[in-house]
DNA sequence: AGCCGAAAATTGGTATGACAATATCTGCGG
DNA sequence: CCGCAGATATTGTCATACCAATTTTCGGCT
């Protein structure tokens, strides 16, 4: 026979071909794919199959499909990993502690790598982020945002996008927890000091020092969290009645 | 109207409800879900929607759908993360180097955590794996398998499943590369020595020592790979004409 | 001409029904 | 008891129709 067995679902083969179209067609993020009906003709399958294939690629993070507009190539594709891990957490909540451990590992190394690779402009931008943090130190909302931004920027210094992708879900999930710790008196100011210390070591290119400061910072944060919750494992607001998939970037 | 805006796609709301059914129903991995038609009645939507919802949950790793049999709850859910990262690599191949860096970070810490948490039976099992490795040292196939198994078992010692999930894709992708380095004369024997050294430190509970040995091992491996490929970035056989999704666990 | 809004065209979302492909169960005959 | 063929259950694919959101077109008005 010409083709092998039809064991693989049509949906998957269609997704594969669409993926190849995207890759070989050099479609940059933001560009639109042909509409479903046209893909049907090109691939020689029904619209059902094309839709399932597009859905597959959307869930995997390659596309973003919008009602009435079409499917566009997604940049980054970070939310795919995040959503997957989020689902994992909802099925097995005990995985949260494990995720925290991974975050600890990665962030410490991130600090080290940042010390190796940060450019002057990175340092400058982070100083500004730190300043913004300082001004909003009494507004919990803005403070948490600035805090997250600081960590994100630090990660970006590593010039490792995949690292960013793998870290993003964790950070996102921890937003709520930071809000908890930020409500404790004094912690915000202390965190600010620690961030400054990290940035100082990064700016100096002191790899081991940066790692060390980050480790200290994370340990202090963990201690705060424990204190704030009375040793309980935190309920990080994982209830999400809707939005199993992602909407905006 | 009772319900709020219809902004969220029916597919997503259906997936959410099915997910809740799985969670609240305490369905263990391996158990079957109701057939599509029954879900249609229960959720009050068409089969189209139910199918797209099930597909979503399958891609996310919660389910495994088999033709003619139905949808069963999947254990682990590791392949979901792997497939997502794999797609990322196909769209942006340059991400491979970044993934390697992440692996380096994680494996070093894994060695440290293993030294903290390995149980006697773990050590025993790993010694056996090492012995199997020793006997097959001249058969590249079996050697690579044993090597991968050693690293996997080490990761399992951390008692951190999520860590395993995040590491799996990387290891899987690196199988091919290990085959390359294993073909160089002497490397297999040297890797064996290094593995033994790591295990020795783990068994002794020497956290820093284990980290150190692992770091040395990875550096040596990287050097070999560089030597074997003449400094080229390796082409790790990422071509996969089919199977965008996963079949077996 | 230029602006604005309604109508038309485009495109994804949902519903329905039918049939094919595959797995599982059932009962008959040996 | 075993083996095998048919019946049954369940997912996979197709075709069609219509709904909903968005974009584009175009005609009327200023």
Image: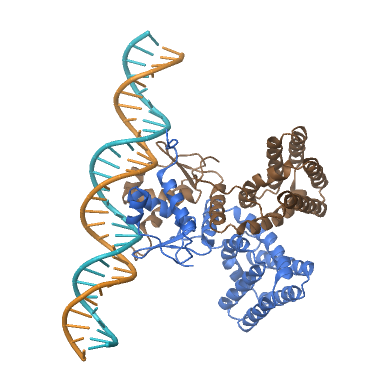
Chain colours: A blue, B brown, C cyan, D orange
Residue at x 37%, y 51% (from the top left corner): A50
Position of residue B9 in the picture relative to residue A207 (left or right): left
Residue at (72, 50) in percent of width and height? B225
- The correct choice, above or below, for B182 with respect to B229 in the image is above
Q: Is residue B136 left or right of residue B99?
A: right
Q: Is residue A6 left or right of residue D16?
A: right
Q: Is residue A37 visible?
A: yes
Q: On the image, which quarter does residue A5 sit in? A: top left
Q: Residue at x 62, y 49 (%)?
A: B236
Question: Can the viewer see residue B2?
Answer: no
- Where does the image place residue A55, in percent across and percent down from the top left? 42, 54
Q: Is residue C6 above or below residue B175?
A: below
Q: Residue furthest front?
A: B230
Q: Position of residue A223 (x, y in %)?
A: 70, 65
- Residue B149, how many percent across, how many down? 69, 41
Closest to the observer, A106 or A242: A106
Q: Residue at x 59, y 74 (%)?
A: A144
Q: Total label count?
A: 0
Query: Which quadrant: the N terminus of chain B?
Result: bottom left
Asked if residue A17 lies left or right of residue B44, the reply is: right
| Residue B127 position (above or below residue A243) | above
Which part of the image, by quadrant, shows the C terminus of chain B?
top right
Where does residue B157 sit, x and y in percent of width and height? 71, 46
Q: Nearer the viewer, residue B235 or B150?
A: B235
């Amino acid at each position: 026979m010409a083709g092998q067995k039809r064991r693989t679902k049509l949906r998957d083969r269609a997704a594969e071909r669409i993926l190849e179209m995207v890759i070989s067609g050099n479609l940059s993020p933001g560009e639109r794919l042909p509409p479903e009906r046209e893909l049907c003709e090109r691939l020689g399958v029904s619209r059902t199959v094309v839709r399932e294939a597009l859905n597959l690629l959307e869930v995997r993070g390659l596309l973003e499909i919008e009602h009435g507009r079409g499917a566009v190539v997604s940049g980054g594709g970070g939310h795919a990993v995040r959503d997957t891990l989020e689902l994992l957490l909802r099925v097995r909540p005990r995985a949260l502690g494990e995720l925290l451990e991974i975050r600890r590992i990665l962030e410490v190394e991130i600090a080290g790598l940042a010390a190796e690779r940060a450019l002057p402009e990175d340092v400058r931008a982070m100083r500004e982020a730190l300043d913004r943090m300082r001004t909003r130190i009494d507004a919990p909302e803005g403070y948490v945002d600035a805090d997250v931004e600081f960590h994100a920027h630090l990660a970006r210094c590593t010039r490792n996008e995949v690292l960013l992708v793998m870290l993003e879900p964790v950070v996102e999930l921890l937003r709520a927890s930071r809000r908890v710790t930020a409500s404790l008196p004094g912690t915000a100011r202390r965190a600010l000091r620690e961030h400054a210390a990290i940035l100082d070591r990064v700016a100096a290119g002191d790899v081991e020092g940066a790692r060390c400061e980050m480790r200290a910072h994370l340990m202090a944060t963990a201690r705060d969290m424990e204190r704030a919750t009375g040793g309980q494992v935190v309920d990080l607001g994982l209830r999400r009645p809707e939005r199993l998939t992602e909407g905006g970037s």
